[in-house]
């Protein structure tokens, strides 16, 4: 692979300035799109890369729709220059992507593989050459299978291995990348991967899920320290959380307690130690029968976990509506979510989840942009002065290429319009939101849904891998050009 000479230190996500005339978005607002390595790269055996937990999981019969896997994905590994040109044509000012841990450090130990790093050097140089600020995520769920074989995120050692990997990545790419995210959605890694088993590695143990959550938190904190030591002082470090905007079904006190429980194990299990230096007391009480927190959280852990971050990434798709079991049964509710056999909510087994009213996406997720405004303002009020990025927001719809070769995804345009409006309202109310990253740049491998769900602004023909910008891509490009909604 030919490597472009290194550019000067990349741009950062700027602090807000005066709003663009006619828009509520500030000048310098980062207009981006996001992807994840396993979902787009392919080339899973090239240049020293070894299997991740998602390679193993996706090749396990019955785990992914249609038996799909990420072996080729959308072949971004070989087509990244074409994809960066697409980003430039759209006018993106920033691009959030993840590094594949097993491509850089195949066993999760030892020195980095230069061939793997060369790909990310070339990608970031291509981005910089087109004036696009790279934002790198260190972990978007692709743990090296070698580490999973040793216990994965259920053991402390993985936290230390993650910090070593973070240092290798920062030392190699810190001259090109100024904004780094440690983890993407650790809730999914812990509770879908080790609790419900619908994500890799497919375990179904409430105790393992809680242990994984703590070790992900510890890994984040240790990685922050490693990044600070390796990067320039100006570098920005973030964490991306899929915080749940939890709402009660009724005004009953039991439903308010259901909200509290889900907020604890869905949100505050991460924001508590990361932003306040402590796990919430009610979370510990709710889950004490599942895990020995005194043994799990060792002296010094919370100091590591609570190292200051510069930005908090918020991923939002849909609100969460809950009730007590008694209220659900009393109302004979017909909108109860289908549940897997194993719950991703340890300590909250009596909570019932409900479908919010209104239109839904192809994922059957209710569309409600007010949840994004509420979520951003909740974080702003709970942690004033903490800058935020919307690091994922988007929707899957059943997109089809028309006879004229175009993709008319007006439903996605409506979704994005409403959710960008929600971000604008949060900014108007005082929230320090510095950027928006559409999920996703292009159609890709959608985890356990395989290739059956399309989130992209760019359509991908999975047979030919031809990329076709959808109507939403062109609409988003106009939003970026104007600096906001019309």
Image (cartoon, grey):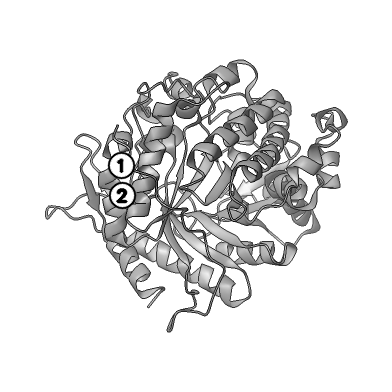
The residue drawn where x is 65% and y is 19% is: 151
Q: Residues within 10 Å of mark 2 (few under 14, many from 20)?
A: many
Q: Which mark is residue 199?
A: none
Q: Residues within 10 Å of mark 1 (few under 14, many from 20)?
A: some
* Residue 69, image quadrant: top left
Residue wearing tag 1: 80
Residue 476 at x, y = what percent?
34, 64
Q: Height in image: 117 above or below 331?
A: above
Is residue 396 shown left or right of residue 459? right
Asked whether the residues under the numbered discs 2 and 1 touch, taking CB atoms below 8 Å apart as contact, a structural biologist would say yes
Q: Residue furthest bottom?
A: 21
Residue wearing tag 2: 84
Is residue 21 shown left or right of residue 161? left
The residue drawn where x is 44% and y is 23% is: 55
Is residue 94 shown left or right of residue 153? left
Q: Residue furthest left?
A: 404
Q: Quick one: quadrant of the C terminus?
A: bottom left
């Amino acid at each position: 692979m030919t490597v472009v000479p290194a550019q000067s230190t990349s741009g950062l996500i700027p602090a807000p300035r005066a709003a663009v005339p006619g828009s509520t978005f500030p000048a310098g607002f980062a207009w981006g799109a996001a992807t994840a390595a396993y979902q787009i790269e392919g080339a899973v055996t090239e240049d020293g890369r070894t299997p991740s937990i998602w390679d193993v999981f996706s090749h396990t019969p019955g785990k992914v729709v249609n038996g799909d896997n990420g072996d080729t994905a959308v072949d971004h590994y070989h087509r990244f220059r074409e994809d960066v040109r697409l980003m430039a044509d759209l006018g993106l000012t920033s691009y959030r992507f993840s590094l594949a841990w097993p491509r850089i450090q195949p066993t999760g130990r030892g020195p980095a593989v230069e061939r793997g790093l060369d790909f990310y050097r070339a990608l970031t140089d291509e981005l910089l050459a087109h004036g696009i600020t790279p934002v790198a995520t260190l972990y978007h769920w692709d743990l090296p299978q070698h580490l999973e074989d040793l216990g994965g995120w259920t053991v402390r050692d993985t936290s230390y291995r993650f910090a070593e990997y973070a240092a290798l990545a920062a030392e190699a790419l810190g001259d090109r990348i100024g904004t780094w995210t440690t983890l993407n959605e650790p809730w999914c890694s812990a509770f879908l991967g080790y609790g419900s088993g619908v994500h890799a590695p497919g375990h179904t143990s409430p105790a393992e899920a809680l242990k994984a959550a703590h070790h992900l938190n510890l890994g984040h904190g240790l990685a922050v320290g490693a990044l600070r030591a390796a990067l320039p002082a100006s570098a920005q470090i973030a964490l991306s959380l899929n915080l749940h905007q939890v709402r009660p079904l009724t005004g009953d006190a039991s439903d308010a307690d259901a909200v509290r429980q889900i907020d604890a194990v869905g949100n505050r299990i991460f924001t508590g130690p990361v932003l306040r230096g402590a796990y919430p007391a009610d979370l510990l009480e709710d889950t004490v029968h599942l895990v020995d927190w005194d043994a799990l959280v060792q002296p010094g852990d919370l100091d590591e976990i609570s190292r200051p971050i510069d930005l908090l990434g918020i991923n939002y798709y849909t609100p969460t509506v809950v009730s007590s079991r008694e209220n659900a049964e009393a109302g004979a509710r017909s909108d109860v979510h289908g549940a897997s056999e194993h719950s991703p909510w340890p300590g909250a087994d009596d909570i019932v989840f409900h479908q919010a009213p209104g239109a839904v996406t192809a994922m059957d997720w209710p569309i409600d942009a007010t949840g994004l405004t509420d979520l951003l303002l909740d974080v702003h009020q709970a942690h004033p002065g903490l800058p935020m990025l919307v690091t994922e927001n988007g929707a899957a719809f059943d997109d089809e290429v028309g006879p004229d070769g175009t993709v008319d995804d007006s439903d996605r345009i409506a979704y994005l319009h409403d959710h960008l409006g929600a971000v604008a309202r949060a900014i108007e109310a005082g929230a320090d939101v510095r950027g928006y990253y559409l999920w996703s740049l292009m159609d890709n491998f959608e985890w356990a849904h395989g290739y059956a769900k399309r989130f992209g602004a760019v359509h991908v023909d999975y047979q030919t891998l031809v990329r076709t910008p959808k109507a939403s891509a062109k609409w988003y490009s106009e939003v970026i050009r104007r600096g906001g909604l019309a």
